[in-house]
Image: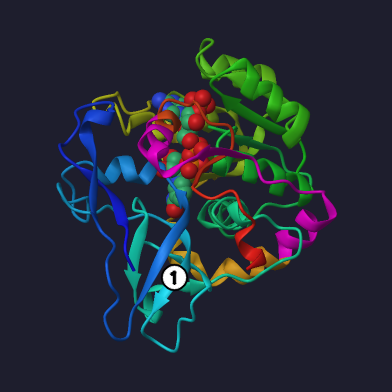
Amino acid sequence: MNGTALTVHQTARPHGFPTSEHFTFVESPLPRPAAGTALVENLYWSVDPYHREMMDDVPGGFTLGAPLEGRTIGRVVASRTSRLAEGKIVFHRQGWRTHAIVTPEEIRRLPRFDGVPPTAYLSILGGTGLTAYVGLTRIARLQEGEDVFVSAAAGGVGTATGRFARLMGAGRLVGSAGSAAKLDHLTREVGYDAVFDYRDGSPADQLRKAAPDGIDVFVDNVGGAQLAAAVGALRDFGRIVRVGTIGQYNTPDAPVPRFDYADIVEKSLRMEGFLVSNHRDVQEELYEFAVPHLQSGRLRADETVADGFEHIVDAFLGMLRGENTGKVVVRDHTEAVFAG
Ligand SMILES: NC(=O)c1ccc[n+]([C@@H]2O[C@H](COP(=O)([O-])OP(=O)(O)OC[C@H]3O[C@@H](n4cnc5c(N)ncnc54)[C@H](OP(=O)(O)O)[C@@H]3O)[C@@H](O)[C@H]2O)c1
């Protein structure tokens, strides 16, 4: 096979917000599969907040001048193993590049569900949806009628959390996000009852107005002042689901939230963090829960799709700046890949 491959490398460690200067696109000849491997042409890529954490000089972080990692979906275009037939659509973690050499052990075959678009396997049915589902079912152990507050509610995890919580019979749903358009989307489309812009004043005051009777569960994607506000608003036996801390990925010196530690005792609160990578066993259960709702139209995947691999860095940086609504997915081919 002739042709070239493109791979994104990180070139320097950022201090604060990264820019496109911290990345470069490297061109190389198409890699050739060795015996036992296959060449995959990547078609859909996920860019995620954890990639920002990996840009720092941390254990397991990105190596400068080397290919990055990330979730991606592609098609086998050349194979030297009977276990990976040409034309197969596969999921693997060698993202941020147009082509990858994979072994059968490194890929996951994706199920095909009628009427479900390929991007959903990186958004509501992928790690993002799984995070939302695990947060509600395993960490919060949400009960019908309970009131829920979600920070970064208009992002990938936040929209999935809101839609799942609604389907699970949650009570009042409160969300915070960073623009009027996002707040509008949350109430009109996702099913949130009350919303506020966390930049528009004290989160504690705004949360009190949005949930005057308090909340039972806080799904926290951000940390900071919103976490402190939620501790104050939680009722007895409330739960804080610590999903992420995007409020400090680009501002590591931001002050840690201050709240009354006595609240944790007096109200019997539970705060628990988790990593979705430790809950892969819940994936089938997520399919069973979400796919029928997706097929019936009761559930939708909120996505911001960037067209063209050349926009992958911009899509990532835009997500950090809050330009996305729903999960950011980069798509290089517009054809229905699952038809093949
Ligand atoms: N625990 C796990 O296994 C796991 C798995 C997946 C994701 N996560 C975490 O979940 C969170 C959401 O991830 P995602 O993939 O769904 O991303 P996302 O929410 O789709 O995108 C990030 C959003 O964060 C908001 N944001 C950025 N800077 C902020 C700040 N300083 N304060 C408040 N909001 C800010 C922006 O929206 P606004 O316009 O609203 O500011 C932006 O759109 C992240 O913290 C991520 O690390 C954790």
Q: Nearer the viewer, residue 313 or 160?
A: 313
Q: Position of residue 108 (x, y in %)?
A: 48, 73
- Badge 1 marks a residue whose secondary structure is strand
* Mark 1 residue type: Val
Quadrant for the N terminus, please.
bottom left
Q: Nearer the viewer, residue 14 or 136?
A: 14
Query: Which color scheme did the rendering employ for the protein?
Result: rainbow
Above or below, comparing residue 333 to residue 101 in the picture: above
The boundaries of the magenta stretch are: 289-317
**Residue at image point 28% right, 86% down:** 35
Above or below, comparing residue 273 to residue 111 in the picture: above
Q: Position of residue 267 (x, y in %)?
A: 56, 39
Disc 1 target residue: 77
Above or below, comparing residue 68 to residue 39 in the picture: above
Quadrant for the C terminus, please.
bottom right
**Residue at image point 64% right, 19% down:** 181
Q: Position of residue 293 (x, y in %)?
A: 79, 56
Find out whether residue 76 is within the magenta segment. Answer: no
- 275 displayed left or right of 123: left
Find out whether residue 299 is within the magenta segment. Answer: yes
Q: Nearer the viewer, residue 193 or 90?
A: 90
